[in-house]
Amino acid sequence: MGKPHVLVIPGPAQGHVIPLMELSRHLAKQGIKISFVNTDFNHKRVVHAFGNNVAENDLLHLVSVPDGLEDGEDRNRIGRLIERLCQVMPGQLKDLIHKLNASDDDKISCVLADVTLGFALDVAAELGIPRAALWPASVYQLVLNLCIPKHIDDGLIDEDGTPLLKDKMVQLSPTTPVVRPTNFLWLNLDPFPSTQKIIFDLVRGNNKAVETVDWVLCNSSLELELERFNLLPKVLPIGPLSAANRLGNLSGNFWPEDSACLQWLDQQPPGSVIYIAFGSFAIFDQIQFQELALGLEQTNRPFLWVVREDSIKGNHLVYPQGFIERVGNRGKMVSWAPQGAVLEHSSIACFVSHCGWNSTLEGVSNGVPFLCWPYFADQFLNQSYICDIWKVGLRFERDERGIIGKVEIKSKVERLVGDENIRTRAAELRQKVTKSVGVGGNSDKVLKDFVEWLKS
């Protein structure tokens, strides 16, 4: 009998590729063979950023399949991307599995897929291959998705997922975050109703797949979401994967990292630097971009700001006049940062974040307080965790223009950095989540059981 051989299939977005790559690298270190399937488009980005060398023992191999879109098509058009993935990818995955099985003595023994790609789990079921799924966000987000029939019965949404009670606040238990129906996941990724319907139908299909798989793992921990895991006993915590996996470079990144910023951080006083990063999707208009720049300048603190080349509508970065000269060496702008290493650095005072789940976990795992600037998807829910449940950060408030102004930015930075209670809670939460992934911790035990199952 050959080695266990797992086909790993992440959703085609940065926040989905990274946790599945972290898990894959862990499994490869346990002697399990991995074929990691990106879309052709993302495969090229990952290889460009890091090359093919993603596992020390040559057990992790990068492969790819088409996503159904043409070269040059906009992959940020989520509705179009999902439609083509659902049409094209099942057949491509079947062909890939047959090809790998024909060319490799170690046949595919398990498909480990992102919950957001329920059709990949359906393919595995059709081929009689054992299935596991990873949910890459908070378990409470999965609870909200699985509660769609309840939301319909309660009159919150109609059969197409459209909100009927937009201002009603949803709270499934006294210890869960409060959510507006307008912030349900499928309504929060794209403003167009046709796209929202596509995403809603995808979520419902994914929910069915979750009910039948052998394992459902979640990149979270009991220390972060105990009561929410109790609502879904089938879903098991193995996170935060970023805290368990201090492996240096994250080979799931889509952009090359600018490691020179770490030397710049070495020159800053402890607990002094504002770190600003908004993930891989957030786009600002020019007015908001300028206000953010001026707000950072007015804090009179050193700051490290991740400014992607496509951060601005129209792709033309224009800083306020004289900004670069005025901030001088106090401000460091990079196109992409080694975020795990940055947040570990002793010079970091706080994290201005879009509150994506990976960024949330990285900040929490390093005891860094947050200033929350959610953009879409589950980020509003994660903001509620940070500010209301864990109490390790603050929200920004928008002005009458819908803008987070420079005065608000300066004010919230001063308030957060001066709040000893928030810093204490952030340090305590860090200890808890570190314990969960340490030897004998809750997440560590689940991961060990999963490895044993794969090997059996």
Image: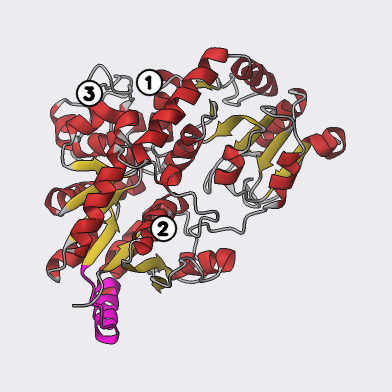
In the rendered image, the vertical position of residue 41 relative to residue 321, given as above or below: below
Q: Disc 1 on helix, strand or loop? A: helix
Q: Left or right: 355 with respect to 309?
A: left
Q: Is tag 2's residue or tag 3's residue first in the polypeptide sequence?
A: 2
Q: How is the image coloured?
A: secondary structure
- Magenta stretch, residue numbers: 92-109
Q: Three-letter amino acid code at disc 1?
A: Ile
Do residues under tags 1 and 2 come within 8 Å of each other at their CB atoms? no
Do residues under tags 2 and 3 come within 8 Å of each other at their CB atoms? no
* Mark 2 burial class by Cα count in 10 Å: few <14, some 14-19, many 20+: many
Q: 46 or 33: which is nearer to us?
A: 33
Q: 212 or 116: which is nearer to us?
A: 212
Q: Three-letter amino acid code at disc 3?
A: Leu
The quadrant in which the N terminus is found is: bottom left
Image spot of residue 396 (x, y percent): 55, 22
* Mark 1 burial class by Cα count in 10 Å: few <14, some 14-19, many 20+: some
Query: What residue is drawn where x is 43% and y is 26%?
Result: 429
Q: Disc 3 on helix, strand or loop? A: loop
